[in-house]
Every structure is written in structure tokens, then in C-alpha cells.
Amino acid sequence: MKKIILPFLLAFFFSSIAQEKGLVVGHILADGQPVPFVSVVLKNSTTGSTSDENGNFSINVPAGKQTIIVQAIGFKTQEKNINVPENGKIHLDFNLEESVFGLNQVVVSATRGLQKRTEAPVIVTVTNSEVLQKSQAISLSEGLSFQPGLRMETNCQNCGFSQVRMNGLDGAYSQILMDSRPIFSALNGVYGLDQIPTNMIERIEVVRGGGSSLYGSNAIAGTINIITKDPIADSFEINTHYGLIGGTSPDKAITLNGTVLSDDLNLGMQIFGMLRDRTQFDANDDNFTEVPLMENQTFGFKTFYRPFVRSKITAEFHTINEFRRGGENYFDRQPFEAYTTEQITSKMTGGGLTYESYSENEKNKYAFYFNTQQSKNDNFYGGRIDDELGNINNEESLRGFGNTEVKTWIGGGQYIRKQDTFLNGTGTLTVGSEYKKEIMTDAKPGYNAFVNQTLDILGIYAQEEWKVNEKLKVLAGLRADFHNAADEAVIFNPRLNILYNLKENLQWRNSYAKGFRAPQVFSEDIHARIAAGEVALVELADNLVSETSHSFLTSLDWNKVLPNSEAGLTFEAFYTRLNDPFVLEQISETIWEKRNGKGADVFGINLEAKYAPGQKWQIQGGATLQKALYDEAVQWTENSVNTNQNFFRSPNVYGNLMTTFSPKKAFQNNISLVYTGSMYVPHFAGYIPTDTLEKTENFFEVNIKSSYVFEVKEKFQIQLSGGIQNILNSYQSDFDKGVNRDASYIYGPSRPRTFFIGLKFGTDLL
């Protein structure tokens, strides 16, 4: 017995000696005020802690020379070297400085795990909530233009359908995520960007290039990850907006945010809400809308509970109700009593539950989640049809009513393992599985047209991130997707990313990724025909296969953070090869068939620059130069003569710029610019005699905004703001007129010159 006990005791004794630790305690301040929920970590380890609501922290670390890193969103990362005594205690305070751009902030979209942006092997660009406020963005669609490679466009005068393009590819090629979950359905892609309020958004992370190896179908151009706000401190905020579109049509909105936390910080909740009422706008006095009427009511919450020290349960819920109508400007009539009308009553309800847990040594992380969402709308596409005597033909006019519903369920799990040793370096292993079920029904009873499609996708993925040394990092991953929408039994999507630190502040990244897009009946591409005033039904061709892609990117990313300035510069070159791209070909008066095309190439460069010489001035901008071509000219109307090799609505040059001047923290002045270059846009017959391909002019949309915060009392402020959007009134001038117009012939900025004022009051507005 002694032979067994003695070695055990000796092993325990020497193990205890080897793990002698000390305690590091301290206080974290910014401008003399405590900063809660700051991440405090030991460099090159998984040991970490978080400051409490009073800015205090404590962390047990091994004795000896150590480096403590402190990082928080909105502040510059700080490091301090210390010598920790054995079984002793050392006091260490930090005074944080605000970070203008968050050049080294923590992101999640690169690897599905938290990681500093400059250390991620995949380049991630971020739009934070401050940029959304500076641009006076009320909804998500109004705030997506301030990223390189991204461009928002409006596609319909009647319903205002909008989509985001990335690297020249239309909205169906980008995977939109909510807190890293692919809950956005094809129906949400048509109207959802206008429905998500910006007051629920913490930041928008964008990864350009194929991302199907992590996020599945549609992540061909890239991913747009909408990170919603977490409850991190007691606060409330009420914001009002009043705008005049074209100086005449009111756009009114009120938003609400509130957060409450328990004293022990183990339970918290944030609620958000929005009411918006936008009046229709007619730009050319033809009694038909260019900007439709929209009424929106949104409510939601996000809450968390920590049942144990290293575990967290997060629940979220949201509901969005919207009514929009456009077309002939007789809104006091039933939709079938007005000529050319689109009316949509939408309701979206969804929620999710996530459980996360860490092991005691924080080397293992587990996550399990379930999300569901129901999106449905009652719609009318059509208008008044008269009989020979000029009276309403009710039988024909009523055919325009229909409804669409999409139900989505997503469930999955993920495991992350931090490896102290991996091939003479260190590593991080990520494995997971995700199942998505989507049921879509679309009914147009008047045309005896009914669609019922069920999409089942099971994805299994794994990736290894290998840190070879301080300069080199390699990431390799593979995802297998099993789905029922095409003939393939399984689709494999690999990725390879290489990060090399040329210098401390200069990273060179190279990547390859394969992506795919599963065929769906309901998608954005058919809406152009509806907007043109035609009934358009889609069928999937026999032997239709998934669209696949091969994406290659190389980038140089330089960042410099000094005590009194910040600067960043990114250069990125991209090339995407599309195989079997989906194209629509007309096979009868009302039927369009989705087929596989011959192939296409998209290539170009993205540039982004940021500079803040101090706290008073901030300048940031981005530009894209690109080309998108099909291998062969594609027929785009029923007339076989009308073919073209270019991607439509895809300008070769576009970009953005934002400048901020703050003589003091309470006084903000912003000028922003969105540039849209010339592009090819189809113009369908009706108002004009024949289908025509138009080449548009260039647009410079310039916006200005000023705001001032008044301190009423401690932790309570009032902000007044005002400005002009599209101050130069750079707006399309050749809209069609009348009942026979092509409502899809719309391009350029989404609104004419618009005046606005705002009033906000709440806590922590500075």
C-alpha cells in the first residue's frame, strides 16, 4: 500500500510546487470613471477574468514574469509586464484610452470564436454602432454602405425592395447572420434589411470571400454578421427622428433601448423597440411612388443567465410587424382599385436559445443553440383592370392577392479546444454540426399558382488553426453539407487561410475557399419581373445542380495605434469563379425557369483607410474597383437579341467616405459620402416601346449631421441632432411615368434630399 501512496504524494507535492501562483488585483478606469466588464487575460495563455461593475478585477496567474493584457470594445488594448511573487499579491491599475476605430477589437466571424481582429487569419471589417449613428441610419439597409466591397441598392419603386451587394455579386450570394446564426430566409432577403432597426445592433462584421466552410449555403461573396447588443450595464435610451423626404414626405421614428442587470451580474436583460411611420414619396409628379409608404413596429429582448461560474444561457426574442404600399398614389382605396399596386403586410417572429460552457482551465468551450423564425406576408401584386365599359373587372383585378410564408428552424453544437502544443506550435480546433430546415409556401390563388418547397441542410464542419510561430498562422477547414434541393448527395466546402506578420503592425493574408448556393424557388432575382408589372412564376429545371464557387483573396492590413493617433490601411485583391450559376430564362408568358448557366468571373480590389490624428478628427473611407462577367452573354428578356455578358446593377467603381470633427466630446459634426459608379441596368418595355439596356450616370450622395449632448445630471443626458441626407440631391432623373412604367427601373441613391432632426435622452450618451 505504501508503494502506491508514496509516489502519489510525491507527484502531488511536486505538482503543487510547479503550479505556484500569485494574485493580481487592480482597478480599471477611463477618464476617472470605472469601466465594467473589461477582459483581463494573461498573455499566451487561456487564463482570464473580467472586471466587475466597479472596474475591479482579480486574476490568479503563475508566479514569475508575466504580461497582463486588458481589452474592451471602444478602448485601446493595453499590456503591462509584471513580476508576480509566489503566493503573493500584486496591485495593478489601468487607465484606458478610447479607441476611435477599434482597429484591434475582438471579432467572432473569422473563425466562429472570439479573436482579436489583427490576429485572425481571415480579415474582418467592422461597422460599429457609432458609424450607424453618424450616418443617421434607422434600419440596417441604411447603414451597410460604409464598408469596402458593400453596396446597397433599391430595386423597386412600388415596394422599396432593397438588397446588399458584396464584391459585385447580388444579395443572394451573401450569407446574412444574426449573432452568427443563418436565420435570414430568402423572404427576409427581400424586405428584411429595411425591417431590422439599428438600435438593436452592436456592430456589423463583414468577411468578404467564400465562407461556406463555416456558415453553409449562400456564403459565396461573403458573410454579413449582425452582432446584437448584449446587456452589459444598467442603462436606457429613447431616440426620436423626424425627416422630410424630398422636403415634403414625413419619415417619423422612435426607438427605445433599456438594460437592467442583477447586483451579482449573473442575470441581465436588454429590450429594444422601434416605431416607424414613413409617408410615400412621388419624385416626378406622375401620382406613382418612388419611395413607398412604410409602417413598422418592432420589439425584442436579449437576456442572459449564468447558472454556474463558467457557463451562460442566452435567450433572445424579436417580432417585427410591417405594412408597406406603393404604386398609384390612391392609398385610401383598396389595392385592386388602384392601377399598379404592391401592398405587403409582413410579420416576422423569431427567437433563440444558446448554452455556452467553459472548462475550468478554459481550454475547452462548448456551445449548443436552437433558433427558429417565422416570416409571413399577405401581399397584393397587380392593380385595377377595367372592362370594356371602363368599370372595374373584379374577377381580373382580385387575382393579385397572395401570401408567402417561410418557417425556419436551426439547431447546432460547437466545440472549441485550445491546444498548448500542435506540430511544434499551438493550435485551436473547432468542430461543429448544424441542421437547418426551411419550409416555404407561396400562393397566388388567382393564377392557380402554388409553391411548396422544403429545404433540409445538415452541415458538419471542422477547422484547425495552427499558430506556427509569432509570425505565421495557418487555418484549414472543411464542411460537408447534405441537402435535398439538388441532385448532389453531399457538397464539400474546404477553406485555407494563411496569416503572416510581415511586421508587428502589418499582416499579409492569403485565402482560398469553396462555396455553394442551394437552389430555391423564392429568391430576389424573380422580383424584377414582378416590379416590372408582370406575373412571374419560377420553376426549377430538371437536373438543376447547386451553384458553386472558388474564391481567392490576398490582402495587406496595416494598423498603428499611438497614444494620440490611430491609423489603418487595408488593400485586398479578390477573384471569384462561379460554376453553374443560376440564370432565369422565360419559357412562357408567366413562367420563368431557373437553370444552370455556363459560368462567370468576378474580380477586383478593395481599399480601406482610417486615420484619427487625435480625438477631434476622424477620417475613414473605402473604395472598390471590380469587374463581373459571365462566360457567355446571357439572355435577359424574352427577345433573344437582348443578351449581355455583364452583371447588371454592378458598377465597376463604388466607395464611401466619412469624416468627423469633434471640437469637444459633446459636439459631433459628420460628413459622409457614398459614391456609385456607372452601371448597366435593364429597362423593360411599357412606358418605353422596347426593352433597353441603359448605362447609368455616376452618383455622389453627400450627407451632413451635427449633434450636441447636454449634461442634465450625472449619468443622464439629452442629445439634439440635425442634418441633411443627400444634400446635393443626387437622385435618378429618368423614372418611368404612369401605369405602364417599369417599377424595377430604379437605381442610384435610395432617397432624394432629406432634412432631419432628432432628440435623444438617456444614460451614457457621451
Image (cartoon, rainbow, N blue to C red):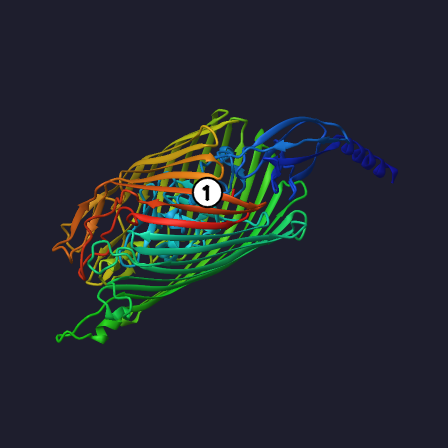
Outermost residue, top direction? 503
Estimate the x, y position of residue 617 in percent, counting from the top left.
43, 32
Q: Amino acid at mark 1?
A: Tyr
Left of 275 or right of it: where is 69?
Answer: right
Q: How many numbered marks does the figure carry?
A: 1
Estimate the x, y position of residue 133 in percent, counting from the top left.
43, 45
Residue 353 visible to an observer of this rendering: no
Residue 658 visible to an observer of this rendering: yes
Q: Is residue 444 above or below residue 125?
A: below
Q: Is residue 681 above or below residue 564?
A: below
Q: Quadrant of residue 28?
A: top right
Viewer-proximal residue, 661 or 90? Answer: 661
Viewer-proximal residue, 17 or 406? Answer: 406
Left of 420 or right of it: where is 373?
Answer: left
Estimate the x, y position of residue 580 in percent, counting from the top left.
30, 47
Estimate the x, y position of residue 724 in percent, counting from the top left.
34, 45
Circle 1 — which element?
strand
Q: Is residue 689 above or below residue 649?
A: below
Q: Is residue 116 above or below residue 195?
A: above
Viewer-proximal residue, 238 or 269? Answer: 238
Q: Which residue is mark 1?
A: 708
